[in-house]
Image (cartoon, rainbow, N blue to C red):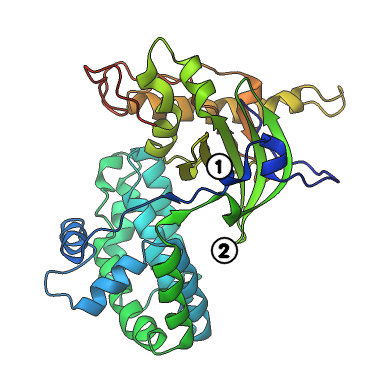
Amino acid sequence: MGGFSSKTSSSKPSVVEAISSPRDVIETVVEWKILPSSNEARKKFEEDGTLSKDSTPDQLELRIMLDEVHSQNAIANYAKTVKALDVFMCWIDIQDFKSIPVESYRRSKALHIYHKYIKTNAILQIQDIPEADRAIYKAAIDLSTKDQSILSNEFYGKVQAKCFSTIYINIYRKFKKTNEYKQLTEQIRKKYNNVRIDDFEYFNKLGEGGFGFVVHCRKKSTGKHYAMKLQTKKGLLECFSDDPWRADFEKQAFASCQYPFIVNLDYAFQTDALAIMVLGLATAGDLQKALNKSAEERLDEERVRFYVAEIVLALSYLHQRGLMYRDLKPNNVLLNEDGHIQLVDLGGVTDETGSTLGKKPENQGMLPL
């Protein structure tokens, strides 16, 4: 089921109308995520280097909040009011940098961080970084043209630690005294572990397949637009009746991939009847539509080379993770308004080694849904 692209529509069908399922099924509340205990969270953050071993309970709370979307938005909004958004954005960018497994892409992100926050006279220059340290980062960036492994995941660890300290002192301690903080903690307490169908506003249908369809939606709490892929569990199990363990491979594949040229999975949940994935929304159609345009509007050779290069990079990333993409076609290459592509529809992905999606259990009756 390809084509998670946005298009206008005068009608605004509800999900209930589109699926023709009982309302009590659609409104089922499902658990999305179980929060770790304080000790588990502390251990995790100390091991990844984002929290020191002598940190206070308040610092631990801040670190947990920096991993949660609603909290990030609230802290960012408050950071604007105290003119400290630059240090908050730097922390987030470095955290993203640390999660990148591919050296070439990590180097690109490292350059972005250096030029935006670290170099002398950078647009959002972080203060309190000694000039000697700035010079060391510049030298390492230059050397990375020949050896990308220099830019390890911990390359910006010292800068991130400075950012965290500044966020805690200049933003968080003040933010914690506001009504906005009280409202945020109450909202998280009530909603963090639950995602439901009616958390989204629904627009037009984007595409459909044999046992499901894709709709354009917007999450009410954040205002962010998505492509929601809804599939009937009955259809999934019938499709994979010869190998039921593969029924949730697409969800697992999306969840395991974080790459700019592959559609991102933000949420995955289920009702009694449906398996649901909430994915990034492409805003400029797909490659098939671009190829179908008139001769005057068709893609020029330079643009074709650009798209092919990004497709190859996406496939290479999947191969590095041990995944084989088996449904490459123009309909499954989405186009964004920023000019880049994203692969979609990972339903046919295979992982013969079990290195990413897990090895098949001996008991074939065990279903992941």
Marker disc for residue 286? none
**Residue assigned mark 1:** 25
Q: As rendered, which of 292 and 360 lies closer to the eye? A: 360
Q: Which residue is pictured at 62% across the width and 19% down the height? A: 210
Q: Which residue is pictured at 43% across the width and 47% down the height? A: 108
At which x and y percent is residue 365?
A: 30, 19
Q: Residue furthest top?
A: 242
Residue 61 is left or right of residue 89, and the answer is left
Please name the amino acid that badge 2 sits on: Ser
Residue 188 is left or right of residue 35, and the answer is right
Q: Residues within 10 Å of mark 1 (few under 14, many from 20)?
A: some
Which quadrant, please, contains the C terminus?
A: top left
Foreground: disc 2 or disc 1? 1
Marker disc for residue 221? 2
Q: Do labels 2 and 1 touch, CB within 8 Å?
A: no
Label 2: element kind: loop
Q: As rendered, which of 102 and 360 lies closer to the eye? A: 360
* Precedes in sequence: disc 2 or disc 1: 1
Q: As rendered, which of 358 and 87 lies closer to the eye? A: 358
Label 1: element kind: helix
Please name the amino acid that badge 1 sits on: Val
Label 2 vs label 1: CA separation? Answer: 22 Å
Residue 238 is left or right of residue 148, and the answer is right
At which x and y percent is residue 136?
A: 26, 61
Q: Residues within 10 Å of mark 2 (few under 14, many from 20)?
A: few
349 lies above or below 270: above
In this rendering, does residue 299 appear at all?
Answer: no
Residue 37 is left or right of residue 173, and the answer is left
At which x and y percent is residue 259?
A: 45, 39
Quarter of the view holding residue 367: top left
